[in-house]
Each structure stands twice: as structure tokens, then as C-alpha cells.
Amino acid sequence: MTIEVISIPDCPNHHPTVDRVKALLNAEGVFAEVREVLVDSVSEVRALRFIGSPTVRVNGKDVEPLAFAQAAMSCRIYEDGSGIPPENLLRRAIVSAAREEHA
């Protein structure tokens, strides 16, 4: 399993998001590579279909599957109004990916 935390430079929510992802992996007993990806150009934003910082993808899938926004180098607000992905979204994505890998 690969988890990407994609952020713009100096994103205040980057490190708290990485910490939350790692804590949930530990709590669920799941091993995954956590990649921290820095996006610092408009061309990278477009190429990655980046919809805000931080974006978390588990095996290439956004943890907020219904999220839709135009690609932008800006902050991201999640369904709970926070700039950090809620634990329930992260947990659901991690557990689902772990099940798919063991199926």
C-alpha cells in the first residue's frame, strides 16, 4: 500500500496530516509506504490533478472520493470544515485498501 500526502510549500496542515496518517496506520496494524510529495508549480498541479493542500491518496485514490474541485495551488478544506483530513476518511481508505490487497 502506498499513501501520498501531497502539499504545497509551507502548508501548515502537511505535518499534522502525515502524523495522523502514521498514527492510523499504527492503530490499524497496517504497513504502508507514506510518500510526502511537494507540489510547487502549476504544471505539477495539473499533472497530479491536485485539488488542494494537503491531498491524501491511498493507492492513488483520494481519501475523500466525492471531492471535486478545480486543480489549484491552494489550501484544501475537508468535509468537516478542517484543513486536515478527518480520521474517519483516512481510516476508511486505509482499511479498504488493506482489504483489497489481502483479497
Image (spheres, helix red, strand yellow):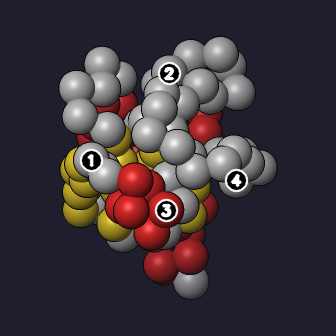
The residue at which mark 1 appears reads as: 40
User: Picture coordinates of residue 35 (x, y %)?
Assistant: 23, 57
Q: Is residue 101 among what the camera can see?
A: yes
Q: Which mark is residue 77?
A: none
Outermost residue toward the bottom in this view: 103
Instruction: Give the label, 2 or 3, closer to the camera.
Output: 3
The residue at which mark 2 appears reads as: 83
Give the spatial CA distance, label 2 vs label 1. 19 Å
Q: Is residue 99 above or below residue 57?
A: below
Q: Secondary structure at mark 1?
A: loop
Give the left or right position of residue 82, taking residue 14 as reference: right
Q: Amino acid at mark 1?
A: Asp
Q: Amino acid at mark 4?
A: Pro
Give the spatial CA distance, label 1 vs label 3. 11 Å
What residue sits 44% from the left and 40% below the top? Answer: 73
Give the spatial CA distance, label 4 vs label 3. 18 Å
The residue at which mark 3 appears reads as: 46
The residue at which mark 4 appears reads as: 65
Label 4: how many residues lie within 10 Å, few (<14), some (14-19) or many (20+)? few
Q: Amino acid at mark 2?
A: Gly
Q: Secondary structure at mark 4?
A: loop
Instruction: Give the label, 1 or 4, closer to the camera.
Output: 1
User: Picture coordinates of residue 80 (x, y %)?
Assistant: 68, 19
